Every structure is written in structure tokens, then in C-alpha cells.
Image (cartoon, grey):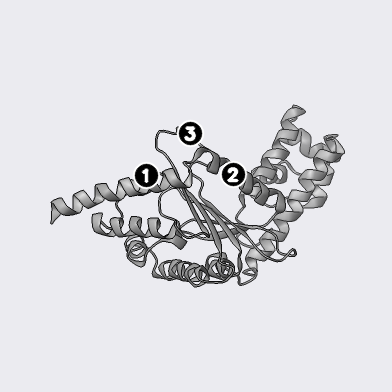
Amino acid sequence: MPKDFRATTLERAIGRQLAGWRAERDLSLAEAGQRVGFSSAKLSMMENAVQPSVPVDVMALGYVYQVPTPEWQAVLLRVQYAEQARVRVQTNGPNFDPAADFANLVYEATSLRVFTTDLVPTVLQLPGYTSRVMQNDDPVRTARLAMVREAWAARLSDRDPLAVHAVFPEAVLRHAIGGPRVMKAQLLHLMEVSGHEAVSVQVVPRDTGPYPAMGSPFTLLGFPHRQHNDVAYLETFIKGEYVEEPGLTERCAQRFASLQDVALGAGESLELIAQATAELEQVVRTCS
């Protein structure tokens, strides 16, 4: 067993699968262990992911339990993957941080489809808005967001500018980040950039009800070279993650298209942004 073993969620799922096989055959730990030549303690530790399962043991259990070959082979692949993943973690893996690299992809991309749930998309934020959002956050992450915004700004005046398609719920317009003045400036900026031919802003109105990808923000980037597949980027305050498997990025593309279908058109969205801006102007005047 690896020193100071800590089971991953995958290894725990494997353990549950092994326990499920035994339960389906109505065997006790002692009975199953006797048939396969394991101690009941070892089998219990495998099922509870107290120790890692190894391929040869999974093969033995599959044979003794008479599990259909495709089923035990699928579990065997998971065991092998979990084993390789643990080695990568123990050796610290490649020194690559998607959150730190994301600004580079924004600079290289030709299209960016972004769906946010709480905030104005990073590339469309003003510095004042970003700083208020991140005022209690990690300064490194704040700097990275600024790099993303700057990467897009640098592309806006290119002969081949980065095409940005943004969708977000109306709640983003109503959440006065940094107070009325900061938010008003941000909304005015949204109105300004949405007039650029390379920028599309669509708002999902609050009376829409449930809609695709609700609560699951993501960014999908497309690139000019045929050898470079689309990349989806997901981020939390803990880390950023790239998703590159074509089947998954295609699902993101389909989900984004569905979001565009339920959102207001560009013209109606601009009207809604203007309405929210006017409401903030009234608040600013009242507070003056």
C-alpha cells in the first residue's frame, strides 16, 4: 500500500463496485475471500477503499464472481487510471496551471463563447468592477483576471479581432458590484462594447424560468488552426480547469447555442442593459 494512502473519489467508486458485485451474489466477506483466496480483511479494505485495488485482484474477483467480461474490464481500466493518477499526484505532475495560462489562450483564440451566472464576463469587465469583485480574494487571481481582460482588449483592434459571444442572466445587471457608480460605469461599458461588430451580448431575462447550464458557468474557446481543437475552461476560486475532449466541448457548444436561443436578442438585451443603467443613474442622483 502506498505510504499515507488517501483514496480518490474514483477509487472509492471502484470499491463500491467491488462490494456491489459481492452483494449481487449474496456472499459474505468470508465466503467471497475464501473463493478468491483473499483474507476477508483485505477484501473489506478494497471495498471500502482503505487500500488501493490492483488490476490482478480485480481480474481475480471478476473471474470468481463470474462478472461479464466487458463489465470487469471497464472496472480494470478505472483501476489502472486511478493508479496512474496517484503516481502523477505523488510526483506533483506537470507544472501547468490552466488558471495562469488562460490569458494566453484568450490571446490566441479567434472566438470566445462565455456564459456567466453571477458576474459580467471577465473580458468585458472594467478594472474598477474587477477590483471590487476581487477585493477580498487572492491577489494572484485578481492579477490573472486583469491579464485576461487585457488580452481581449489588445485583440479588439486587430484586423482579425477575437469574436466574443457572451450570455448571462439578468441578475448580473441587478447586482450592484461596488455600488451604483461602479456598476453604472460597468453597464455603460457593456453598452459601448456591445456595439462592436466582434462582440455579442445576450441577457437571459429573469422571468425565463429554468434554462440550459443554469448555475454552471463556462467559457468555450475556438482557434484558427485545424490542429487546435476547441477548449472549454471552467474555474472556481480554487482552480481553473481545461476540458479538451471533443465530445465534451461539443456538448458545451450545444449548451451555449441553447442559451442563445432562450436569451433575448442583441437589440432587446441592449435595451435591458440601458434600462438597468437608467435605474442606477436614478440611485446615483438620489445619493448625491
Q: CA distance from mark 1 to mark 3?
A: 20 Å
Question: Between disc 2 and disc 3, whose residue precedes?
Answer: 3
- Residues 140 and 275: in front is 275
The label on residue 210 is 3
Residue at 79% in and 48% down: 76
Question: What SS does tag 3 mark?
Answer: loop
Does the image show residue 49?
A: no
Residue at 53% in and 69% down: 103
Question: What SS does tag 1 mark?
Answer: helix
Which kind of residue does numbered mark 1 sit on?
Answer: Leu
Which of the two marks, 2 or 1, is nearer to us in this view? 1
The label on residue 272 is 1
Question: What SS does tag 2 mark?
Answer: helix
Q: In the image, 260: left or right of 122? A: right
Which of the two marks, 1 or 3, is nearer to us in this view? 1
Answer whether labels 2 and 3 touch (C-beta < 8 Å): no
Q: CA distance from mark 2 to mark 1?
A: 21 Å
| Residue that numbered label 2 is attached to | 257
Image coordinates for residue 174, horizontal then vertical, percent: 32, 46
* Quarter where residue 242 is shown: bottom right
Image coordinates for residue 246, horizontal then vertical, percent: 71, 53
> Quadrant where the N terminus lies?
bottom right
Question: Between disc 2 and disc 1, whose residue precedes?
Answer: 2
Q: Residues within 10 Å of mark 2 (few under 14, many from 20)?
A: some
Q: Residues within 10 Å of mark 1 (few under 14, many from 20)?
A: some
Q: Relative to 139, does residue 36 appear above or below in the rendering? A: above
